[in-house]
Image: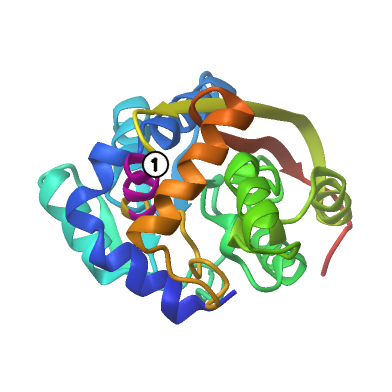
């Protein structure tokens, strides 16, 4: 993953993010369902974005010490404005390489771990940072079937290759294999959410402004007006509408005893 490019994408679109993140907001609510009823005193949120999930965490755990980090300074600034006065610690940092202390009751993230370059190393570090008595890891993460419709149309029209960053996201089996090295998995589920758009241009705008575009179209194609029109006709013929799948894994786990030093 090109972290610099991803950071620029999110930073550029921070002012628009909340209007184009309906699926992500729904994922945040699903995460809250997974942890509701637990008691947490020290919480670390990775990839807080504009604070959609952060607000839910604060509302559910009003007395907890919550630290929320994001790689994009613009995202953190937007979250800070929205969540002013809520007693949160907001930081600009790459969550994959964040210097971690120990004793967190909850490490959590909504739709950000798919951008990690070395997820195995990251989850190993997260497991060490959790409280050995009650530490919980709970997160959502995008899978490789995200935007599969658009990927298929691009491959058919422009050639068979990986056009979207999402096609490189790790599979559920790979994710579970990594998690089982460091955690006892309590809940693992896979879901597909479908979004509909009035036009292909509307979908592209939504994908860009939600930061989900990754590196864009593999650096090899530019979508001019005529190509977009051609792709849209193919899209409508194939799927009967402009639809986009969001492929999401949800995982809740506890730190495994004796799995690390």
Residue at x 53% of width, y 18% of height: 37
Residue at x 34% of width, y 53% of height: 49
Point out the image quarter for the C terminus.
bottom right
Which contiguous range is marked in magenta?
A: 200-208
Where does residue 8 sit, x and y in percent of width and height? Answer: 34, 74
Q: Is residue 205 magenta?
A: yes
Where does residue 91 sit, x and y in percent of width and height? Answer: 31, 67
Point out the image quarter for the N terminus.
bottom right
Q: Is residue 152 magenta?
A: no
Q: Secondary structure at mark 1?
A: helix
Indicate left or right for 247 with 257 as reference.
Answer: left
The one of 102 and 254 positioned closer to us in this rendering: 254
**Quarter location, residue 53:** top left
Indicate left or right for 130 with 12 as reference.
Answer: right
The one of 131 and 234 positioned closer to us in this rendering: 234
The one of 229 and 186 positioned closer to us in this rendering: 229
Q: What secondary structure prevails in the magenta region?
A: helix
Residue at x 37% of width, y 63% of height: 224
Indicate left or right for 158 with 62 as reference.
Answer: right
Residue 201 vertical placement versus 239 (above, below): below
Q: Which residue is mark 1?
A: 203
Residue 206 vertical placement versus 181 (above, below): above
């Amino acid at each position: 993953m090109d972290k610099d490019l991803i950071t620029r994408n999110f930073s550029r679109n921070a002012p628009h993010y909340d209007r184009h993140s309906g699926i992500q907001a729904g994922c945040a609510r699903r995460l809250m369902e997974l942890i509701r009823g637990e008691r947490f005193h020290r919480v670390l949120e990775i990839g807080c974005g504009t604070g959609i999930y952060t607000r839910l965490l604060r509302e559910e755990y009003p007395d907890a010490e919550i630290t929320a980090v994001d790689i994009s300074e613009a995202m953190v600034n937007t979250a800070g404005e929205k969540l002013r006065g809520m007693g949160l610690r907001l930081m600009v940092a790459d969550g994959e390489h964040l210097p971690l202390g120990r004793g967190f009751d909850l490490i959590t993230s909504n739709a950000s771990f798919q951008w990690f370059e070395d997820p195995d190393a990251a989850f190993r570090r997260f497991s060490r940072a959790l409280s050995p008595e009650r530490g919980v890891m709970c997160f959502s993460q995008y899978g490789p079937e995200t935007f599969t419709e658009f990927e298929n149309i691009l491959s058919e029209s422009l050639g068979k290759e990986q056009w979207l960053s999402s096609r490189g996201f790790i599979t559920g089996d790979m994710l579970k294999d990594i998690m089982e090295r460091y955690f006892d998995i309590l809940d693992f589920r896979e879901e597909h959410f479908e979004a509909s758009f009035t036009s292909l241009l509307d979908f592209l705008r939504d994908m860009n402004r939600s930061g989900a575009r990754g590196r864009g179209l593999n650096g090899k194609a530019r979508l001019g007006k005529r190509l977009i029109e051609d792709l849209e006709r193919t899209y409508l013929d194939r799927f009967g509408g402009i639809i986009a799948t969001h492929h999401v894994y949800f995982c809740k786990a506890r730190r495994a005893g004796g799995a690390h030093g």
